[in-house]
């Protein structure tokens, strides 16, 4: 055990650039914001008891708007830990509590959102870096821009976001004949209700799709053992990115694909991002920005401009104390400036507020505020404030400010981590690992082994099974640690039907609802959680009439009201397309199933705010 904690201590003490974490925070937050925006768009469908007709007990709109604001703060790295905490609490309320609309990516969100409270993702590309610089601008010990972070930040996110998921997933896949026969990618992409886009030309290449199925299985097996060695990271990155780009292009779960791609960005070395962003910088500065260093307000203005100057167009110069120079103030007059912007090529200069607002136009992050500063009225008020603060702001009494030479980050001595922190962090990872192992105990493969060994009905077997089920109530809710059964035999065996709905208007007009399209593919109403709901809970290998009734009721009510159509009197035809599930690879299978004819199976209609369904036994059609 001591060796384990020594290993954790080495990971904490080992430092690397924080650029990768900054990029991950931005990309992941953008993806998650899109997911939450999609939930917001479907909030009445997902959270209402009956969409629009019988609202949920609590109005979700204000809370979800606040949630999206918190994610925006997290994305920009502004009050990062506070935003991450709020994001996690909202995730518990709106994601962890979902039952029939949950899908695989929600588990990953819960684990990562919990970690974001603790990992250091704001050391680069964040407003918090600017806030720190502004707060310490008059400190005698003003620190350099030290973006070095512990490598454990990277390992923790990859471990929870990818490695644990793959570790658990293989215990399901090895028990699945679908994956053992190499059909794990081909079959889901070959059934109409799952395949969003048609890649029949690729699916017809038997050797390719069988190889990709086995490659996916092998990749998930070895990932946990290889990701701890940085020399394998480029290979893991390329394979992982390619597999999830395929998921993005084929299946109606875009935020799952993009979210996992964001996790794989953590495998890119921080030096890559430094070199990439260095290429954006100008070879030579276009402007010279001179400011009075001993003036707090002007120095903070210079710090702000320098922070957002991603193209490196400014060269900062410090005005000599007591120096006086008359330049054009922008209105044809002369002034003794305290803030001077001059063009390197021709020497044209502006001073004071006019120099600051002009400089803002050349900085992407300040371009819009810079435009606002040119508006009449705004320019006058802002100019007066700038002039007043620029001439009256002085160093705090007793301060002994002196500029310090910025020391390269890799030359900064790093204090050894405290023992208590090592044991705290190490214990936390032990708990999470044990929760994952206990959850995996319920997987089909282990269940089969336990049963074959005669342990299942023993005291130990029953105890472990009970612990596994009970622990999931906590681990799944708060950390997303649960079984990862994705695209297994049970999802497709007996799935011999696709169900769609068509609206019939009073004047005989017909509208095919964008749930399942006429060729059987998922429509625009099905994406992520709504796709999982329709394809595997309302519909599915085995049809439950109660689920059909409640599902048709919810989706039709949502569609009608969103399209400003009256609910009462609305009539729908239920269509069924009979398909089959193959046991082996077949050429042209997806095309043949999409070409199957639709069969009228019944009708559904709204009467006095109630949905009435009259449909045949779908299984017997």
Image: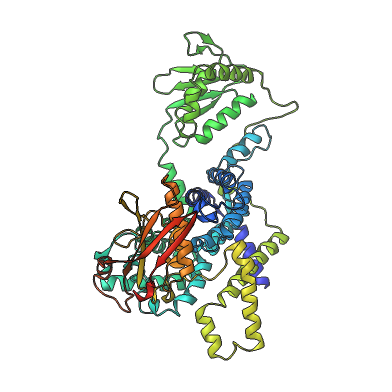
Q: Position of residue 542 (x, y in %)?
A: 43, 74
Towards the viewer: 487 or 25:
487
The residue depicted at 41 percent of the width and 40 percent of the height is: 280
On the image, which quarter does residue 304 sit in?
A: top right
Q: Position of residue 260 (x, y in %)?
A: 46, 59
Towards the viewer: 491 or 224:
491
Q: Position of residue 142 (x, y in %)?
A: 65, 37
Relative to 175, is 51 above or below? above
The residue depicted at 67 percent of the width and 53 percent of the height is: 415
On the question of residue 557 being in view, the answer is yes
On the image, which quarter does residue 620 sit in?
A: bottom left
Relative to 331, is 599 above or below? below
Q: Quadrant of the N terminus?
A: bottom right
Q: Is residue 403 left or right of residue 501?
A: right
On the image, which quarter does residue 621 sit in?
A: bottom left
The residue depicted at 34 percent of the width and 51 percent of the height is: 505
Towards the viewer: 127 or 201:
201
């Amino acid at each position: 055990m001591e060796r384990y904690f020594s290993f954790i201590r080495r990971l904490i003490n080992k430092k690397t650039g924080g650029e990768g974490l900054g990029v991950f925070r931005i990309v992941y937050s953008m993806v998650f914001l899109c997911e939450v925006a999609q939930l917001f768009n479907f909030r009445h469908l997902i959270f209402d008891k009956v969409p629009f007709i019988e609202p949920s007990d609590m109005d979700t709109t204000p809370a979800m708007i606040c949630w999206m604001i918190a994610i925006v703060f997290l994305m920009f790295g502004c009050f990062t830990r506070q935003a991450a905490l709020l994001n996690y609490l909202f995730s518990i309320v709106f994601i962890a509590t979902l039952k029939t609309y949950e899908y695989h990516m929600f588990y990953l969100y819960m684990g990562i959102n919990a970690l974001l409270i603790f990992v250091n993702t704001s050391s680069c590309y964040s407003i918090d870096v600017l806030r720190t610089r502004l707060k310490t601008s008059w400190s005698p010990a003003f620190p350099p821009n030290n973006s070095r972070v512990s490598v454990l930040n990277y390992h923790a996110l990859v471990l929870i976001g990818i490695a644990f998921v793959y570790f658990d997933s293989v215990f399901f896949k090895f028990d699945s004949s679908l994956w053992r026969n190499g059909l794990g990618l081909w079959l889901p992409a070959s059934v109409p209700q799952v395949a969003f886009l048609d890649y029949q030309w690729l699916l017809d290449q038997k050797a390719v799709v069988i190889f990709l199925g086995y490659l996916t299985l092998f990749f998930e097996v070895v990932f946990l053992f290889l990701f701890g060695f940085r020399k394998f990271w480029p290979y893991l990155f390329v394979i992982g990115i390619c597999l999830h780009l395929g998921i993005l292009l084929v299946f109606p779960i875009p935020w799952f694909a993009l979210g996992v791609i964001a996790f794989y960005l953590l495998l890119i070395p921080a030096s890559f991002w430094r070199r990439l962003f260095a290429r954006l910088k100008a070879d030579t500065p276009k402007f010279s920005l001179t400011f009075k260093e001993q003036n707090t307000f002007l120095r903070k203005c210079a710090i702000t401009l320098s922070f957002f100057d991603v193209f490196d167009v400014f060269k900062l110069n410090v005005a000599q104390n007591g120096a006086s120079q008359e330049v054009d103030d922008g209105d044809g007059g002369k002034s003794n400036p305290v803030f001077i912007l001059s063009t390197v090529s021709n020497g044209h200069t502006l001073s004071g507020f006019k120099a600051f607002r002009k400089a803002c136009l050349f900085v992407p992050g300040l371009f819009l505020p810079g435009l606002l500063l040119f508006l009449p009225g705004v320019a006058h008020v802002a100019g007066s404030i700038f002039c007043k603060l620029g001439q009256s702001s002085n160093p705090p009494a007793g301060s002994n400010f002196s500029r310090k030479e910025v020391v390269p980050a890799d030359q900064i001595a790093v204090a050894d981590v405290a023992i208590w922190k090592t044991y705290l962090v190490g214990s936390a990872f032990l708990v999470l690992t044990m929760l994952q192992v206990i959850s995996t105990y319920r997987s089909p493969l282990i269940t089969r082994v336990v049963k074959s060994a005669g342990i299942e009905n023993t005291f130990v077997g029953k105890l472990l099974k009970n612990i596994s089920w009970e622990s999931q109530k906590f681990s799944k809710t708060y950390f997303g640690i649960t079984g990862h059964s994705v695209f297994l035999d049970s999802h497709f065996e007996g799935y011999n039907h696709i169900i769609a709905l068509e609206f019939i208007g009073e004047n005989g007009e017909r509208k095919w609802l964008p749930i399942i399209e006429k060729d059987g593919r998922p429509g625009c109403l099905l994406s992520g959680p709504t796709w999982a709901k329709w394809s595997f809970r309302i519909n599915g290998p085995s049809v439950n009439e109660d689920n059909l009734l409640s599902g048709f009721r919810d989706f039709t009510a949502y569609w009608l009201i969103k399209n400003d159509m009256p609910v009462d009197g609305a009539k729908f035809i239920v269509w069924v397309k009979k398909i089959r599930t193959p046991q082996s690879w077949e050429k042209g299978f997806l095309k043949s199933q999409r070409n199957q004819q639709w069969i009228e199976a019944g009708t559904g209609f709204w009467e006095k705010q109630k949905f009435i369904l009259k449909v045949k036994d779908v299984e017997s059609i």
